[in-house]
Amino acid sequence: MTEVPSAAELQVILKEADLLAGPEQIEAALQRLTVEIRERLADQVPVVYCIMNGGLVMAGQLLPRLDFPLEVGYMHATRYRGETTGSSELQWQAPPSVPMEGRSVLILDDIFDEGYTLAAVVAACRAQGATEVMTAVLTNKIHDRKAPGFDVDFVGLEVEDRYVFGFGMDYRGFWRNAPGIYAVKGL
Ligand SMILES: O=P(O)(O)OC[C@H]1O[C@H](OP(=O)(O)OP(=O)(O)O)[C@H](O)[C@@H]1O
Ligand code: HPA
């Protein structure tokens, strides 16, 4: 069994991390996302899926702002599994919880990093008969290692090319609950 770090060790991770975006910047990003998404999807009665686990906080904060009719679902696809580099194999831990055939779909996730997760999720939604599939992420990590031929539709904030955590994103499984977006010291 993997050993759980102590609370003191985890506090050091947070204390030594660099704050990239605080609550005010995140609030502004969520407000921008709300306006853009409403403009595009308000009359589509979409199914809005949270990608577990990372999308949980973003979805929880964004959904109550989307003041139009929609359904909520979730799916869990994971590539990092507690590591700081992604595996080539995407594991589906939970398939989409709501049928999407003939529906407009909006996918919510915490981070568009290399993009292989969302590219595979969008392909799966198309294969399951969604008529249109849009993606919204809280953060887009800026680098040139993106999956070819795929992009997201709505981005809250750009973050630098470091390993980030907070607001849904984990560092080795921890600190998804941190109220800002932080970069791990040295990563
Ligand atoms: O753009 P990519 O490089 O594919 O990475 C982004 C994905 O990685 C993280 O999920 P992770 O695999 O860590 O699963 P988790 O949310 O369950 O931790 C994150 O929540 C995104 O879904
Ligand atoms: O930088 C990151 N942080 C947390 N989760 C992630 N999943 C992909 N990239 C990241």
Image: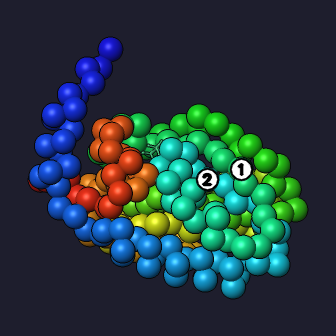
Q: Nearer the viewer, residue 118 or 68?
A: 68
Beta carbon at label 1 within 8 Å of ligand 1: no
Residue type at numbered disc 1: Gly
Q: Nearer the viewer, residue 44 or 8?
A: 8
* Total numbered circles: 2
Q: Is residue 109 above or below residue 2?
A: below
For the question of whether residue 81 can be seen, the reply is yes
Provide residue 187's location: percent of width, then percent of height.
Answer: 17, 53
Q: Residue at x 36, y 38 (%)?
A: 173
| Circle 1 SS class | strand
Residue 164 falls in image quadrant = bottom left
The answer to whether 97 appears left or right of 27 in the picture is right
Q: Nearer the viewer, residue 173 or 134?
A: 173
* Furthest-top residue in this view: 1
Residue at numbered disc 1: 73
Residue type at numbered disc 2: Cys
Q: Give the mark nearer the N terminus: 2 vs 1.
A: 2
Q: Is residue 123 above or below residue 4?
A: below
Residue at numbered disc 2: 50
Q: Bin the neighbour count of mark 2 within 10 Å (Cα to Cα): few under 14, some 14-19, many 20 and up.
A: many
The reply to whether the C-beta atoms of the residues labelled 2 and 1 are less than 8 Å apart is yes
Q: Residue at x 21, y 38 (%)?
A: 10
Q: Is residue 72 above or below residue 26?
A: above
Provide residue 146's location: percent of width, then percent of height.
Answer: 40, 65
* Location of the N terminus (image quadrant): top left
| Circle 2 SS class | strand
The answer to whether 62 appears left or right of 96 in the picture is left
Q: Bin the neighbour count of mark 1 within 10 Å (Cα to Cα): few under 14, some 14-19, many 20 and up.
A: some
